[in-house]
Structures are given as C-alpha cells and as structure tokens.
Amino acid sequence: MTTEKLRVAAIDLGTNSFHMVIVEESKGKGIIEVDRVKDMICIGRGSISTKMLDQDAMNSGIAALKNFLVLAAHHGVEPENVIAFATSAIREAKNRVDFIRRIREETGIKVKVISGREEAEYIYYGVRNAVKIGNKFDLLFDIGGGSVEFVIANNKGVQLLESRKIGVARMFERFISTDPIGRHDIKMLEQFFSAEMVSAVVKASDLKVTRAIASSGTAQNIARMINALNGRDNTQSLNNSVFTRKEFQALYKQVLPLSSIERKRLPGLDANRVDLIIPGLILFDMIFREFNLGEI
C-alpha cells in the first residue's frame, strides 16, 4: 500500500506493553491517527529487582516489533519513519545495550532510551493532541509498569513534569505478598504512593487544579471495568470518557477483596492485568484522595 501523505509509526517500548501508533498529518485536522496496535510483552517481568531483562521477554518483544513493522508497511510507513522510544524497564536494565542492539540487528529499528522527564513531556504532547486543554491548570498522569508520570499544564504551558518510580509492575513486585492483597500491603502501598506524590500534590494545590486526565492501559482498563459494572457500552472509544469518584469507589470495594482467580472472571478486566490491576486501583484511589478529585 502506498500513500502520498507522510506517515510515521511511533513505538513505545513500555514496561508492561509495546504500543505502536501510526499517524499522518492532515490539512486542517493536524495529526490524525491511522492505526494502533498493542502487545502485552511485560518486558519488565522480574527486572524491577534484578535490573536484567528476561531472555524470553526480549524474544517476545522482538517478535512483536517484527509484527509491528508488517502493519506499518501495510499502511505505507517507510522504514526510516518508524521511531521507537524505550522507557522505565529498559532504561534501568543493565543489559539494555544488548537488547537495543538485538532490536537494531533483527528489525532495523533504532531505539532511543528516554529519561523520565522526557517521557512526561511526550505524554503532555500526546494528551494535548487528544483532549482540549484550557486556561485552567489540569493534572495529567500516565500509569506505566515501571513509572508514573505527572504533568500539570494549561494551554499556555507546563508547570510540572515529574516521573516517579511507582509503576504498577514495580509496586506489585515490591509490595504485594498475598493473594488476595492484605491490609498491611494496602497500607504500605498507600503510604509509599502518598510520599511519592507530595510535590505534585503541593503544586496542584498552589495552581488550584480541579481536573485530572488519565492515560495508559491501566486507566483504560479501570474505565472499562466501571462501564461493565454500570451496564454501559464498552465497544466505543474511551477517549474523553469520564468516571466519578463514587463509581470508582464501587469498583475498588468490589475488586480488592478478590483473589486473582476470582478477578479473572470480572467483566472488562484484561487477562494480562489480573495482578497489576491491584496496585493500579490503589494508586487511583490515592490520586482521587490526595488531589481531592471528584472525577477523572
């Protein structure tokens, strides 16, 4: 397939998933999305503590990237217009150079490892392209597997760019010791999240932030589960969808006491997030509480 319009494929090599978005520039519409694909590679599996990427995960990652290239070519993306960025798990891995070299040799893709601050900045650009940002300051946050990015911005610029090492895979590996999760582990996670969010909470209070915009697979999965719990349509795009604190609390109270086997039967829950949804829910709960939000 060929196209006269310039198309670019951007790949996010995240701790939980590899995600590719294909876009093109359109007159009068700016950047528009052509297609997207995601594969739950879990490249950070076991690497949070060892700082070594797992061999099987690396093999799966390279296989996924080869599939991504097929899709990109189908949409007319030239090889030189495929760009890839590596985040938390790869950024911290001792064997990241070996993995990045393998990707280059086996797929031709050049991978750029970005800092946490750069990651937060890219998230701001992405959200700004998808959601209308006004004069009032908004909190933007993206929950990854290894890190969580916090941004406070309005249509005139950014006031805060932060990346904290509190991603759901990292927190699950570090804090959760029982299934279902016990009260002690919940309290430890709450205290850790609260301490890590202090500077963002203070800045949000100073700037009178009242709206929060969430991105990432964890946020989408929680939104789908809330929709399922309330009998709402889950076939439509979740972009610009909203759920209230009350709706979230109903889901939180239902899910937290369940074992992983019981959680697998929950409608709307991605099978690959059966474990990771627990620290994700606790983090969302703390964000609602610490930033005093009514909806996200």
Image: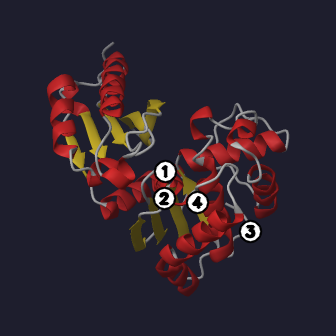
Instruction: Tell whether 196 sits left or right of 60.
Output: right
| Amino acid, disc 4 | Ile
SS of the residue under disc 2: helix
> Which is more toward the observer, 244 or 90?
90
Q: Distance of mark 2 from mark 1, alpha carbons? A: 9 Å
Q: Nearer the viewer, mark 3 or mark 1?
A: 1
- Picture residue at 57% right of the left edge, 35% below the top: 272
- Label 3 with label 1: CB-CB less than 8 Å: no
Q: Which residue is mark 1?
A: 169
| Amino acid, disc 1 | Ala
Q: Which residue is mark 4?
A: 213
SS of the residue under disc 4: strand
Q: Earlier in the sequence, mark 4 or mark 1?
A: 1
Q: Nearer the viewer, mark 2 or mark 1?
A: 2
- Label 4 with label 1: CB-CB less than 8 Å: no
> Which is more toward the observer, 2 or 102?
102
The picture places residue 124, in percent across and down from the top left corner, at 43, 59
Instruction: Residue lying at the far top in this picture: please name it.
Output: 1
Q: Earlier in the sequence, mark 3 or mark 4?
A: 4
Q: Which residue is mark 2?
A: 174
Q: Earlier in the sequence, mark 2 or mark 1?
A: 1
- Picture residue at 33% right of the left edge, 61% below the top: 116
Determine crowd level at label 1: few under 14, some 14-19, many 20+ residues with C-alpha closer than 10 A.
Answer: many
Question: Which quarter shows the N terminus?
Answer: top left
Q: Distance of mark 3 from mark 1, alpha carbons? A: 27 Å
Q: Is residue 81 visible?
A: yes
- Label 3 with label 4: CB-CB less than 8 Å: no
Q: Distance of mark 3 from mark 4, alpha carbons? A: 12 Å
